[in-house]
Amino acid sequence: MMYTMNPIGVIYSPFTDKAQTPIQPTRSQAAGTVNVYPAFADGLKGLEGFSHIILLYVFHQSVGFSLMAKPFLDDQLHGLFATRHPCRPNPIGLSIVQLLARHGNILEIGGVDVLDGTPLLDIKPYVPDFDLRSDVKTGWYERRSKE
C-alpha cells in the first residue's frame, strides 16, 4: 500500500544548522512561525483557543536510516523505534509547541525545535485529557535522566 502526503504549510525557525537545533521542544526557548497554506486556513478556526499544538512534519534534511541508533542523550545503541532519532524509514517528526498567537493562516509558536523551512504535514490541538499520561515507563532514558 502506498501513501502520498503533501505539506499543508511550512515551519520557520531560527535554526539553519542541524547541529544547533534543540533536540526537543521542551529544551527550546526559540520562537518560530508556522505558515499554513491559504488553501488550509479554514482548518485553523478555533485553534487559537489552545495553548499548545502538536506539529507533525517531515525531517526534510534527514538521509537514510539504520535500525540501530545512538540517541542524542545516550552513548549506547538502541533500536531506532526506541529513540527519537530523526533518520527514520518514514522521516516524520512530532513536536508539541506553545501556540502564542494566530494571525489568519500564520501561527506564532514558542519552543520550536525544527530546522527553518520544515514542511508541515498536520496540526493537532494538545489536549491533556487525551495526551497526558502519568503511568509511564521511559526505558533506557530513565537511567540517563537520573545522571
Image (cartoon, rainbow, N blue to C red):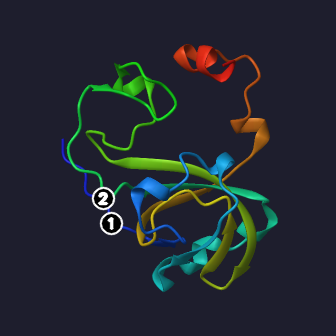
Mark 1 sits on what residue? 6
Q: Counting other residues with Cα less than 10 Å from the Cα at mark 1, is it few (<14), some (14-19), or many (20 or more)? A: few
User: In the image, which disc is placed on residue 61?
Assistant: 2
Tell me the distance, in whole angstroms, between the alpha carbons under discs 2 and 1.
16 Å
SS for tag 2?
A: loop
Dot 2, how many residues are within 10 Å of its Cα: few (below 14), some (14-19), or many (20+)?
few
Q: Where is residue 63 in the image (x, y as percent from the top left)?
A: 22, 50
Q: In the shown orientation, is residue 13 left or right of residue 77? A: right
Residue at the spot x=30%, y=59% of the render?
Answer: 61
**Label 2 amino acid?**
Gln
Place of residue 144 in the rendered image (x, y in percent of width and height, measured from the top left):
59, 20
Q: Where is residue 128 in the image (x, y as percent from the top left)?
A: 78, 40
Assign the N terminus to one quadrant of the image.
top left
Q: In this view, does 87 lie above or below 38?
A: above
Expressed as whole percent of the image width and height from the top left, the position of residue 122 reads 49, 59
**Residue positioned 30% across, 39% down in the render:** 88
